[in-house]
Image (cartoon, grey):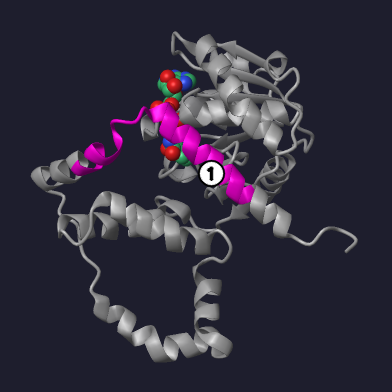
Amino acid sequence: MTHTFRTAAVIGAGTIGLSWTALFAAHGLTVRVSDPRPDLADAVDEALTAFGPHLAAQGLDVDGLADRVHITADVTEAVREADVVQESGPERVEFKRQLFAQLVREAPRHALLLSSSSMIPATAFTADLDDTGRVLIGHPFNPPHLMPLVEVVPGAHTTEEAVQAALDFYTFVGRTPVVERREIPGFVGNRLQNALSREAMHLVQQGVVTPEDLDTVVTHSLGIRWATTGPFLSSHLGGGPGGYRHLMEHIGSALGDMQLGEPSQHPDDLERVIQTVEKAYASTPYADLAEARDRGQLAVMTALENTRPQKGN
Ligand SMILES: NC(=O)c1ccc[n+]([C@@H]2O[C@H](COP(=O)([O-])OP(=O)(O)OC[C@H]3O[C@@H](n4cnc5c(N)ncnc54)[C@H](O)[C@@H]3O)[C@@H](O)[C@H]2O)c1
């Protein structure tokens, strides 16, 4: 398996695939994008135009970005010369099973085969396929051309060599890969996000807080904290000089008394939450909300980068 990445194939050009495409091209890769959507050419053009400034702000050279991106509706054509394939199609086991059967057959034997899957572990769609040692999950956070984390999750048959190649690849394109050794639906990031989202929905359903105020609670406290220290380091610091041990011994047992809620999944209750969220946000166009999010996230990452000690100091 080669560790030189010159040509990437992106299969599926929706929210995630378009963002990967821009990122890979900005790192000098030739990118072949495949998607049956009839507006593929326009979607790619729009994405490169919209994401170009974000990539330039990360210090990447975006001159000639579009020249390195080629589109095709034909998966075979897209993967023919690929060193790496990043599948970003629909989140359905059967889709991924059929596509990876084709990728294993048609991509060059050295090509690394990665799936952006958010929930479905690789073993679920490769169990009955041969030659799947080079298949694994590379789960990004949206949008991957900005968010650094990629969860690298090997399946039951993934080789160590493929795991290392995935780490090399994501490092090459400027991401921060983390290997997770046991497959679990949703992996780590989405499970954590889901834990918070469930309690958020419970609090709104109970009338404790509105969706907008809950978002303000997060963006003005936990969001800022977690951009610098994750939950464990935050708790360690929250314990004062006695650290995590002190916090657990003195507050740990009280954490269980909070009785976190189980949000109602009844369609009427879900509909009520959906309507309040839409009332808060749906009058602003999606593109404007996404642009504001991307600008803000980029500003946070740039600010954090500037707080790191400079080399030689
Ligand atoms: N949206 C997110 O926040 C997010 C984050 C991380 C990972 N993911 C994962 O990334 C993957 C893509 O998600 P998305 O949000 O971009 O979905 P999306 O619906 O925006 O895009 C999926 C694309 O796949 C295309 N497609 C359908 N059939 C295809 C085929 N046979 N060959 C090639 N392309 C085909 C569709 O036309 C569509 O453009 C999913 O596995 C998802 O779980 C999504």
In the picture, measured across the screen, residue 290 lies left or right of residue 62, that is left
Q: Residue furthest right?
A: 312
Vertical side of 242 occupied by 228: above or below = above
256 or 168, which lies in front? 256
Dot 1 alpha-carbon crowd within 10 angstroms: few under 14, some 14 to 19, many 20 or more: few
Q: Is residue 127 visible?
A: no
**Can you say which quadrant of the picture contains the N terminus?**
top right
Residue at 52 percent of width and 73 percent of height: 234
Residue at 56 percent of width and 73 percent of height: 233
67 or 105, which lies in front? 67
Percent x, y of residue 141: 51, 44
Corner quadrant of residue 184:
bottom left
Residue at 50 percent of width and 80 percent of height: 238
Percent x, y of residue 265: 16, 50
Residue at 43 percent of width and 91 percent of height: 249
Percent x, y of residue 58: 70, 39
Q: Amino acid at mark 1?
A: Gly
Vertical side of 277 occupied by 181: above or below = below
**Can you say which quadrant of the picture contains the C terminus?**
bottom right
Q: Per the image, is 122 magenta? A: no
Q: Per the image, is 278 magenta? A: yes
Q: What span is in magenta?
A: 276-301
Q: Which residue is mark 1?
A: 296
Quadrant of ligand 1 in image: top left
Corner quadrant of residue 4:
top right
Vertical side of 32 occupied by 254: above or below = below
Q: Is residue 257 visible?
A: yes
Vertical side of 81 occupied by 127: above or below = below
